[in-house]
Amino acid sequence: MAGYPRVRLDLPWTPDAIRGYVGCLEPSAGVHDPLQAVALAVEVNGTRCVLIGLDTLVVTSGFTTAVRSELQEEGVDGDDVLIGASHTHGGPDVFGFWEVGEGPPPEQATVAATVLAARRALDDLEAATLYWGEAEVPDVSINRRDERHGPTDPAVSVLSAKSQESGEVIGLLVNFACHPVTLDYSNLDFTADYVWALRETVRAVYPSAAAVFLNGAAGNINPARYPYDQKANIYIPQTKENYPVYWGGYDDALRMGRVLGAAAIQATERSRPLEARSITSRRSDVELPLKSGEDLDAFLDFMAFRASYRSRLQALDGLPTEVQRISIGDLSIVGLPGEPFVELGLELKRSSTSPLLVAGYANDDVRYVLTDESYDGGQYETVGTPLAAGAAATLVSAARSIL
């Protein structure tokens, strides 16, 4: 299980907000719901793109490169393939970041399953009309840095495809910005968290549709505690004195997934046709500023990554990654790596004059991308990222350059 690693608590500078944190990095006990790779393929005038939602904590650049390479055999250019991790905390340590368990991590098997999902989507292409719609759910998520006043992104954005032959919805892309952490560290069953219930809710209404979920800019966004009018984080801060504290279970995942699924259905039913004249794509390589010296060592010590992860970062002056834009007609889908704070997604949306979907956790893992003012030594994300101040501005600038 990768979602709640045992971070170091014996360090004198461990953030106060997480001194009582206890992870559960150990083998899973079973499967609550199947972890999935779901793909949506779109073709316009001979150009094809593939949008993939994956039930993993993260994806890496190496993983994305491997999938893109396989799909080139299907005539799909690498620029036209986007992979977004749902960021479920109920999934496996796919990339072996922490060297726990027997045998190799399941990276290659996950590549193979992801490629298979994409190939099935490409094989199932049929004449369809595309639609774009949005609904808002303002109360199921919370800014975990500032529960009362911090920004969230309430938009549930949906790209849907309706068969021109049957009239049925045959594909959906659903986007919402929130950490899938309704389940706490006591859960040892594999699960997609609220994403599972969201997909099941949508499929009950559109049984012929594959439902791809792409998380948004959710680095500082958590589920809200039920009842939602509390405006409180589902996560209950722990200390050494109050441990153990549990905060959520499958009832919470089911409730939140159904609320979001209902919003996705509303957005689909109220959507308007998308003028899909063409598919265009761009990717831009970008180097994000990296912490150095004691600051980088603090991140590596705190997260207790394996030795190879540590040595790779220590050899770099900056962290290379990418931003991506896939445009289907007037709709642009922007893929941002790592865990961008919600402010980044909102800033990009505000500056766009046409529909824009922001996908975080896309194509690469660079950890948290904080705004400069969010670097606070008492907070988890400040230590839990290898990136230095300036990373957010660099990433947003790179994204704007390809829009």
Image (tube, helix red, strand yellow):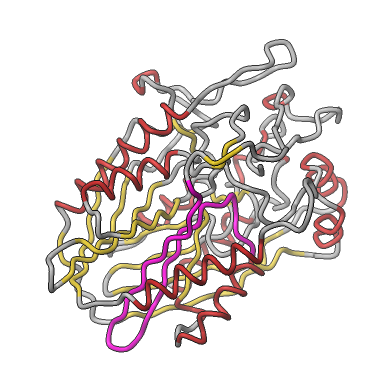
Q: Nearer the viewer, residue 55 or 178?
A: 55
Residue 41 covered by magenta stretch: yes
Q: Is residue 363 left or right of residue 389?
A: left
Q: Tell me the residue at 47%/43% (across/down).
A: 33
Q: Position of residue 353 (x, y in %)?
A: 28, 63
Q: Position of residue 178 (x, y in %)?
A: 45, 41
Relative vertical location of residue 63 with respect to residue 266 in this rendering, above or below: below
Q: Position of residue 157 (x, y in %)?
A: 30, 53
Q: Splitting the image into 4 quarters, where does residue 251 fall? A: top left
Residue 161 covered by magenta stretch: no
Q: Nearer the viewer, residue 273 or 187?
A: 187
Q: Nearer the viewer, residue 119 or 161?
A: 119
Relative vertical location of residue 364 with respect to residue 369 in this rendering, above or below: below
Q: Is residue 355 left or right of residue 244?
A: left
Q: Quadrant of the C terminus?
A: bottom left
The part of the chain drawn in magenta is 34-60
Q: Nearer the viewer, residue 229 or 121?
A: 121
Q: Splitting the image into 4 quarters, where does residue 381 fall? A: top right
Q: Position of residue 283 (x, y in %)?
A: 52, 76
Relative vertical location of residue 235 with respect to residue 191 in this rendering, above or below: above
Relative vertical location of residue 75 with respect to residue 377 in this rendering, above or below: below
